[in-house]
């Protein structure tokens, strides 16, 4: 017998792998290996699936993904409905398991870091491919800020995007006007396959870093708003890939003077803490 997983779990694992989860990629490889379940899974667990635990708010649903499995020996002659192929899916024959337990059933996987586990647990909550891009038009800012464009699904207890005070249509337009026409900023936006907003962050492309009377124009990633914690990490990775120099060390409003280097700065190397950032004299962008 092979390891059996539901269609929804297959889809979630495929999207999590596509979105960068190394654990999801390894799990899919095991499931596609064609090996007998005894070569893949510890114990008698099989027939894996997921279910959604939903909390409804005004404009979105907070989703927690719970893994489930049949851990009973369905070949035992005393097992009820032993010859019924649907028996492993009956509620009374299923056990809820957390993500780490689910991963632990797979005997051939390597050790993973806590960061890998956290990324997987978050990514499995979104059954969609994530697309991230930097934009620079006024309408791009409006679309990214308007609450009606936000994803209706968020990771349980983790969204900062839906708590933004700038999500109303009027405020979104004012914000876009400021960032585009006055500040000269850009914006990184993460979207799902239906173009719902999953995350956004302002990019300041021309900020002056002053250090010991030396100056250099650099780019800075501002606070990230997101629906799932793994989106935060993916935006950081994207910002690094497009050679943005710095990101905020602490992703909140209060900490405005500490940064982490994403890409080395020619004059100053990779020192992580900044002292002074100010507008570029050649543009209106500012921090």
Image (cartoon, rainbow, N blue to C red):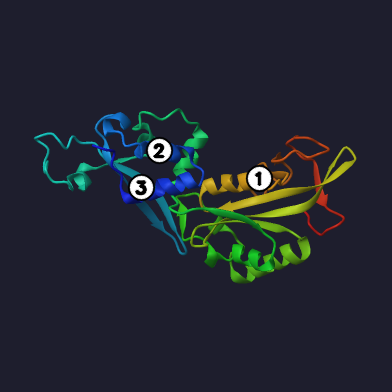
Q: Nearer the viewer, residue 210 or 7?
A: 7
Q: Residue 57 in the image: state x and y as whole percent.
A: 44, 60
The CA distance from mark 1 to mark 2 is 27 Å
Q: Residue at x 39, y 40 (%)?
A: 28
Give the total number of marks visible in the rendering: 3
Mark closer to the chain start, 3 or 1: 3
Q: Nearer the viewer, residue 250 or 208?
A: 208
Q: Quadrant of the N terminus?
A: top left
Disc 3: which residue: 9
Identity of the residue furthest to the bottom in this view: 170
Disc 1: which residue: 241
Mark 3 touching mark 1, by CB under 8 A? no
Q: Is residue 232 left or right of residue 26?
A: right
The CA distance from mark 3 to mark 2 is 14 Å
Mark 1 touching mark 2, by CB under 8 A? no
Mark closer to the chain start, 1 or 2: 2
Mark 3 touching mark 2, by CB under 8 A? no
Q: Is residue 180 above or below residue 78?
A: below
Q: Residue 97 in the image: state x and y as whole percent.
A: 33, 39
Q: Is residue 202 left or right of residue 104?
A: right
Q: Nearer the viewer, residue 28 or 120?
A: 28
Residue 287 appears in the rendering: no
Disc 2: which residue: 29
Q: Secondary structure at mark 3?
A: helix
């Amino acid at each position: 017998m092979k390891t059996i997983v539901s269609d929804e779990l297959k889809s979630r694992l495929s999207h999590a792998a596509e979105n960068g989860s190394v654990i999801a990629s390894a799990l899919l490889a095991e499931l596609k290996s064609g090996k007998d379940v005894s070569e893949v899974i510890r114990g008698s667990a099989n027939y894996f699936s997921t279910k959604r635990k939903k909390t409804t708010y005004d404009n979105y649903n907070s989703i927690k993904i719970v893994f489930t499995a049949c851990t009973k020996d369905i070949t035992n002659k005393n097992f009820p409905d032993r010859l019924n192929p649907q028996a492993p899916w009956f509620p009374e024959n299923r056990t809820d398991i957390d993500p780490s337990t689910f991963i632990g059933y797979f005997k051939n996987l390597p050790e993973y870091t806590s960061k890998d586990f956290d990324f997987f647990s978050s990514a499995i909550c979104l059954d969609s491919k994530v697309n991230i891009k930097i934009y620079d038009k006024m309408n791009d800012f409006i679309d990214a800020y308007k609450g009606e464009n936000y994803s209706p699904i968020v990771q349980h207890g983790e969204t900062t995007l839906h708590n933004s005070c700038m999500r109303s249509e009027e405020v979104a337009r004012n914000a876009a006007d400021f960032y585009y026409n006055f500040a000269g900023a850009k914006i990184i936006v993460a979207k799902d396959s239906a173009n719902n907003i999953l995350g956004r962050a302002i990019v300041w492309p021309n900020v002056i870093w002053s250090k010991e009377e030396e100056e250099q124009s650099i780019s800075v990633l501002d606070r990230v708003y997101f629906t799932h914690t793994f989106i935060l990490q993916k935006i950081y990775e994207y910002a690094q890939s497009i050679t943005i120099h710095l990101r905020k060390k602490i992703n909140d409003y209060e900490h405005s003077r500490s940064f982490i280097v994403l890409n080395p700065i020619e004059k100053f190397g990779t020192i992580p803490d900044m002292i002074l950032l100010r507008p570029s004299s050649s543009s209106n962008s500012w921090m």
